[in-house]
Image: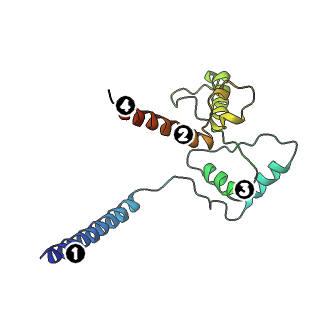
Amino acid sequence: MNKIITSFVRWLIKGLDKTVSWLEQKNANDMQSKFVDLAPTDDADKAGTYSEALRFATNNSKISNIALTGPYGSGKSSIIQSFLKTYRRPVLHISLATFITEAETKVETVDRQEIERSILQQMLYGADANKLPLSRFKRIQSPGVGSIFKSLYILLGMFALSANKGDRHI
């Protein structure tokens, strides 16, 4: 009797699972037609024009900074991601957000110090704390491989001490 009930429950679960999968797929297809994904892709530069320009700039010793500009949704992040797919040297991502609201139209209101602070924060927080020379972040260290063994050793010691206390008879 238990076998029959178990097989029936499994059959019911499989049927419900297929129904849920079908409904999720139908819902995803409906949503796909309504919305467009603006996330960066890594196949934006199929002709390689932008990658060629960026490679020229990175190999030129006279060029030290590269900036891509353009309106929202123009594909800047996709171009960078496509380029980085084949670029093998280390890179540092710094994003300059809009510091002026759309209501303010005067460029003079942008504080240079605010932009510099944003760049520095991205540089410091994006790097590994152990690799920053002469930094106050040096005190914040990532746990090493040996920390697992140290923790295990301390835990075993505490367990041995607590087990030892239980052996004492008064």
Label for residue 11? Answer: 1
In the image as oriented, which residue stretches furthest toward the right? 61
| Horizontal side of residue 12 vs 1, given as left or right | right
Examine the rendered structure and indicate whether residue 70 appears above or below residue 167.
below
- Element assignment for label 2: helix
Q: In the rendered structure, which disc, 4 or 3, sits on the residue that comes first in sequence?
A: 3
Q: Position of residue 37 (x, y in %)?
A: 48, 55
Label for residue 50? Answer: 3
**Quick one: 167 or 23, which is closer to the camera?**
167
Give the residue at mark 4: 168
**Quick one: 84 or 36, which is closer to the camera?**
84
Q: How is the image coloured?
A: rainbow
**Quick one: 23 or 77, which is closer to the camera?**
23
| Horizontal side of residue 43 vs 33, given as left or right | right
> Gap between marks 4 and 3, in whole Å?
76 Å
Which amino acid does the dot numbered 2 rest on? Answer: Tyr
Give the residue at mark 2: 153
